[in-house]
Image (cartoon, grey):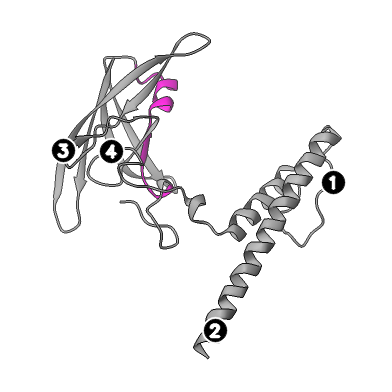
Amino acid sequence: MARPAGGGKNTVESCRSVDVLEWHRRGYLRPPQWFSWAWTRDGERVASINVETQRHGVTLKYRSRSYGEGWRDVEQRVGIEWTSCRLGGERPWFECSAAANGDYCGRRVIKLYGAGRLFACRHCYRLAYASQQESAHQRGLGKSQKIRMRLSGSSNMLEEFPDKPKGMHWRTYERWRRVHDVAEERSTRGLMGFVERLGRRTSRRA
């Protein structure tokens, strides 16, 4: 089951998911065939499903357990739609098979999430991305650190901005420097805003 990040909505990152493009790249969607798909944590298998492939759909077979209930066998049919690519070939999409209040979803998506008994799209489960729940300070800090490490530097913001890597064009390096500086400024403003709000709350309690 998905878990909220920071007390907000449940997130896609906290859910097990299946990716139709990954299965296509691995050749798993060439019917008819069976395969097993597993999720691991620290190298240990934590969950798995069996999948039967047809041309226009897959059947997911697994066991599910809700809070306070026993294990139940689930067999879920998920449609697959194929669309033409601009440079030739086809690409697949899952068709979300979830329904709420009698309304069938049917969204065309790449990933389905196991946030409940059935696999469904993030819209049906109202899942957010973890980055959407980060503060302005966290987003800015994270982006700044990623740029520093991309340039073979340290993520420590107290250290000097890394020198231009060998082989990188100066124009590219300066562009990354500008993006870094904007993100760092956003992080600082977000932190100052948080401190200011905290100060106001403390004053009201005094």
Residue type marked 2: Thr
Residue type marked 3: Gly
Calculate the distance from the C-alpha at mark 1 to the C-alpha at mark 4: 47 Å
Query: In the drawing, what numbered circle is on residue 190?
Result: none
Q: Which quadrant holds residue 91?
A: top left
Location of mark 1 (residue): 163
Q: Earlier in the sequence, mark 2 or mark 3?
A: 3
Q: Residue at x 40, y 21 (%)?
A: 24
Q: How crowded is mark 3: few (under 14 residues within 10 Å), some or many (20 or more)?
A: few
Location of mark 3 (residue): 102
Q: Using the image, determine if residue 51 lies above or below residue 206.
A: above
Q: Using the image, determine if residue 114 lies above or below residue 5.
A: above
Left or right: residue 12 compared with residue 153: left
Most extreme residue toward the top is: 88
Give the x, y percent position of residue 1.
30, 51
Answer whether residue 17 is magenta in the image: yes
Seen from the viewer's position, the closer of residues 5 and 151 is 5
Q: Residue at x 69, y 52 (%)?
A: 183
Location of mark 2 (residue): 202
**Mark 4 vs mark 2: in front:** 2
Q: Which of marks 1 and 3 is nearer the N terminus?
A: 3
Q: Which residue is drawn at 46% across and 10% down?
A: 89
Residue type marked 4: Phe
Which span is picked out in magenta?
Answer: 13-29
Instruction: Label 3: state its secondary structure.
Output: loop
Q: Using the image, determine if residue 198 lies above or below residue 183.
A: below
Q: Are marks 1 and 3 in contact (CB under 8 Å)?
A: no
Give the x, y percent position of residue 164.
84, 41
Q: Which of marks 1 and 4 is nearer the N terminus?
A: 4
Q: Which of marks 1 and 2 is nearer the N terminus?
A: 1
